[in-house]
Image: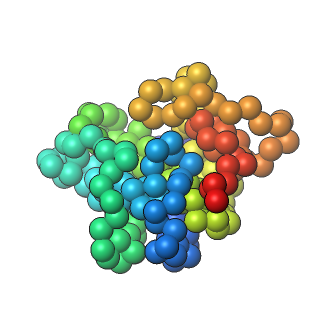
Amino acid sequence: MDTMVDLEPAGRALLTTVEGVLESRLCGHSPCDGVSAGELVQHLCGLTLAFRAAADKELGPLTDAAPTVPGPLVEPGWRDTLEAQVPALVEAWRSPSAWEGTTRAGGTDLPAEVAGRVALSELVLHGWDLARATEQEYVVDDATLGAVLEHVGQFDPKGTPGLFGPAVPVAAEATLLDQVVARSGRAPWWVPPH
């Protein structure tokens, strides 16, 4: 398995979704139980900053705090924040040194290559969450989805408290995106209630 993974396609997919979010949808539900679309956006603002710091081994307040979901309500300027922070995150994980040694994320010390995979999975899964919450199509390449499926496939299919719910059964011929989503405990067919 190659250690390094390019986060750029996942970042691009997230930013495409961000562009299409209507402010009026931020109060609505997301696929994450009890988390609004706005709280999800605020979580993305925090995690993109924290995982950029993890890549740079900039250990401190950004990497020491455990993520809060649901987080605070979305702050003004969130779109500009993500448009700046997502490319910075992607660029930070392009450095081979980001994937070497150990780092910290969410207050947990872990191998840097694991942190990079977590960052990728967060971008993809929460990108899908946001797209679903705002009724947009979510598109990302198969190489990225394959890397995320490999990562989430290492967790207990019965669920991992604080990370993933129990895997949702899908047909053998399900798309790679649906397999990733289902393995992470999300129902691929989820739509926001009206």
**Frontmost residue, 124 versus 111:** 124
Along the line of sight, which residue is nearer the eye, 142 or 180? Answer: 180
x 22%, y 43%: residue: 65
Q: Residue at the location (27% across, 40% down)? A: 66
The residue lying furthest to the left in this view is 60
Please tell me whether residue 53 is drawn above or below residue 91 in the rendered image. Answer: above
Question: At which x and y percent is residue 47?
Answer: 34, 53
Q: Can you give x and y, in whole percent of width and height, for residue 187 in the image?
A: 67, 42
Q: In which quadrant will I find the N terminus?
A: top right
Instruction: Give the image quarter of residue 191.
Output: bottom right
**Residue 68 shows in the view:** yes
- In the rendered image, residue 77, in percent from the top left (x then y), is placed at 32, 76
The reply, left or right, for residue 141 in relation to residue 97 is right
**Residue at x 46%, y 62% (from the top left corner):** 27
Vertical comparison of 94 with 156: above or below: below
- Total numbered labels: 0
Q: In the current view of this chain or complex, which residue is farthest to the front?
A: 194
Asked whether residue 150 is in view, the answer is no
In the shown orientation, is residue 63 left or right of residue 166? left
The residue depicted at 54 percent of the width and 26 percent of the height is 159
